[in-house]
Image (tube, rainbow, N blue to C red):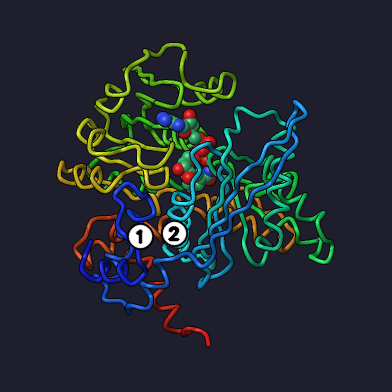
Amino acid sequence: MNGQTHTVFDELGFRYEPDSLYHQVITDVLDTSGRLEQPRHLQLILAQPKNEIMVHYPVLMDDGNYRLFKGYRVQHNNILGPYKGGIRYHPDVSLDHVKALAVLMTMKCSLMRLPLGGAKGGVQVDSRAVSTDELRRMTRRFTSALGDNIGPNHDIPAPDVGTNAQIMAWMADTYINLSDARGRFTGQAVVTGKPVAFGGSYGREAATGQGLVYVVTELLPELGIPLDGCPFSVIGYGNVGSWAGRLFENAGGSLRGVMDHTGAIHADAGLDAYELAEHVAATGGVAGFKNAEAISVEDFYKLNVDLLIPAALEQMITETQAAWINAKVVAEGANAPTTPEGDRLLRERGITILPAILCNSGGVSVSYMEWRQDRDAVQWREERVQDELRSLMNAAAQRVKLAAHRYGVDLRTAAYASALEHIGQVYELRGIFP
Ligand code: NAD
């Protein structure tokens, strides 16, 4: 933490907690802002989310009992446009994590130059442990508890870990039903990542993995790594991991190992990324996949690959895993998968990290396209979505490379620098109200 960041922490009464994801992320952001010599008021504003909304609500469970759920929506910053960010259903959802993920959304939208701000939400629940009926009732009640805190012109949620297109459809339907004064016509633009039949966009489901693949296929050859036969491994085989796996296989990669919450698997000859996705859809995890050897977590990290794609949860790559990793490049599909100590060790070991706010911004980019389609009541062809996504990802990758060169910094710092330059410029143009 640099001296200026220290004084911001002091002024806001924060005491640095090394295990706090929020403190880790905001320290990186503030340190980079200090390096750019940005005004102190900008750092104070970014150091705290604008709104931290916490709701508790009862839901009727299938056994006839009521259960009380805790939900969050953190709206970090909206200087660039309406708040935007996913909703997570996971037992470990906490205010600290949701705040950190909201900051990352602000940075991501700014790096991509999208007219959107940053937010994140979540509910403490294991979505695999509740029935479909319970999930629907819980989602509708959470949406109504959020009330006017979300809206197509104000704050637009999307799927994240543990949520999907069906859950977004229930959120949109609940929102539309709550009040027709809000307008039924554009009401579905309140969330993105919906099914294509109900206001969703072609390309949204695979967008995050696709965006990551656009970035790595652009940057790996520049790092001297050929795409043809490129050995790679993936952590997490959910939405992001399985699409990154399938689409990078299409681009020439050879999937050598995958780890998820059910175990780790490996095959020297390569795993079929499409068949593995079918296996996960049928069984819930990668364990037991045919033609693959079950391996330990440590052996998974030690696999000799050119590319590792973490696409599961935050803070999975600490110093321990960073010492094991035997890859040339880590392309972060998950948000904040690398702790500061893990990051430092990977860099010391000469491993290139392609940061999350660049690699996983394909999701919010196609969400932005979905929101535009909903507002115009049109549906774009898949080719148009892919063209726009490819050019947005390539432009952002160029921005990050330029910033790394200009400031002489690693790619993560460069991505924050480019995002902060844009936000700083908009604050200067708009001024601080009144
Ligand atoms: P998902 O729920 O579809 O998949 C999560 C995966 O993580 C699953 O395969 C699960 O098995 C795995 N996992 C959970 N605990 C694990 C553990 N302890 N060890 C190994 N694997 C574990 O979620 P997703 O939407 O693919 O999101 C994954 C990451 O990508 C998250 O960090 C999310 O914030 C980020 N992200 C998602 C999107 C999106 O569009 N879905 C966009 C940007 C970023």
Image quadrant assignment for residue 180: bottom right
Q: Secondary structure at mark 1?
A: helix
Callout 2 crowding tier (Cα within 10 Å): few <14, some 14–19, many ≥20: many
Q: Is residue 212 visible?
A: yes
* Camera-nearest residue between 320 and 364: 320
Q: Are marks 2 and 1 in contact (CB under 8 Å)?
A: yes
Q: Is mark 1 within 8 Å of ligand 1?
A: no
Residue 289 at x, y percent in the picture: 47, 15
Left or right: 356, with 201 as reference point: left
**What residue lies at 41% left-to-right and 61% top-to-bottom?**
395
Q: Secondary structure at mark 2?
A: helix
Three-letter residue code for mark 1: Ile
Counting residues from the start of the chain, the first of labels 2 and 1 encountered is: 1
Q: Is residue 207 visible?
A: no
Image quadrant assignment for residue 301: top left
372 shown above or below 347: below
Left or right: 197, with 157 as reference point: right
Residue 319 at x, y percent in the picture: 23, 38
341 shown above or below 35: above
Residue 201 at x, y percent in the picture: 65, 49
Judging by the rendered image, the residue that carries numbered circle 1 is 26
Q: Quadrant of the N terminus?
A: bottom left
Residue 311 at x, y percent in the picture: 42, 38
* Camera-nearest residue between 183 and 72: 72
Three-letter residue code for mark 2: Val
* Camera-nearest residue between 94 and 252: 94
Judging by the rendered image, the residue that carries numbered circle 2 is 103
